[in-house]
């Protein structure tokens, strides 16, 4: 009887230790970083929304792509959509990479500066022009 009782006590103690260790490892009280939302809207020179346009959200070093998005039928794309549509609050640059059918419209600039604001949505617009290929 002493042997069974001893094994049972060991098993109960082991299960209690595992539960306590598991609870300690799942502590989610760490720091919360401030986040905001950045949405890009891409339109053509006639102000019509353009879908399937890839746009990058870059760090100010112009070398690090932080997030990417692709516009939907409304011409809008949300950076970090796969992470709930939020990005860290900081300065970014919105970059339009080379595209087979579109280029930046005349007067439009690349590396548009944008600052994500905590708990707010910031909208950035890009105007593009259809690339015309002359058969020849």
Image: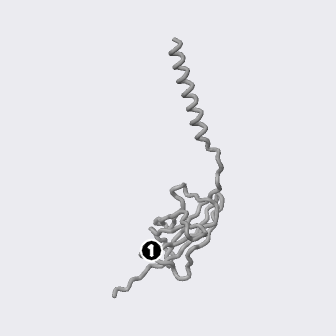
Vertical arrangement, residue 71 with respect to residue 134, above or below? above
Residue at the image point whose x is 56% and y is 78% from the top: 109
Vertical arrangement, residue 6 with respect to residue 81, above or below? above
Q: Position of residue 124 (x, y in %)?
A: 58, 69
Residue at the image point whose x is 55% and y is 66% from the top: 64
| Count of numbered labels shown in the rendering | 1
The front one of 42 and 18 is 18
Q: Position of residue 111 (x, y in %)?
A: 57, 73
Secondary structure under badge 1?
loop
Farthest-out residue, bottom? 136
Q: Considering the image in quadrants, where does the C terminus appear?
A: bottom left
The residue that label 1 is drawn on is 99
- How crowded pointer 1 is (Cα within 10 Å; few <14, some 14-19, many 20+) is rated as few
Q: Position of residue 4 (x, y in %)?
A: 50, 15
The front one of 11 and 86 is 11
Farthest-out residue, front? 3
Farthest-out residue, left? 136
């Amino acid at each position: 009887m002493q042997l069974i009782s001893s094994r049972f006590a060991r098993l109960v103690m082991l299960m209690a230790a595992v539960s306590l260790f598991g609870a300690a490892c799942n502590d989610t009280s760490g720091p919360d970083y401030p986040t905001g939302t950045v949405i890009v809207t891409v339109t053509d020179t006639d102000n019509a929304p353009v879908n399937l346009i890839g746009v990058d959200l870059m760090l100010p070093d112009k070398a690090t792509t932080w997030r990417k998005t692709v516009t939907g039928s409304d011409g809008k794309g949300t950076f970090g959509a796969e992470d709930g549509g939020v990005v860290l609050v900081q300065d970014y640059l919105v970059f339009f990479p080379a595209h087979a059918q579109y280029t930046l419209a005349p007067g439009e600039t690349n590396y548009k500066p944008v600052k994500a604001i905590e708990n707010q949505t910031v909208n950035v617009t890009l105007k593009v022009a259809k690339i015309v290929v002359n058969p020849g």
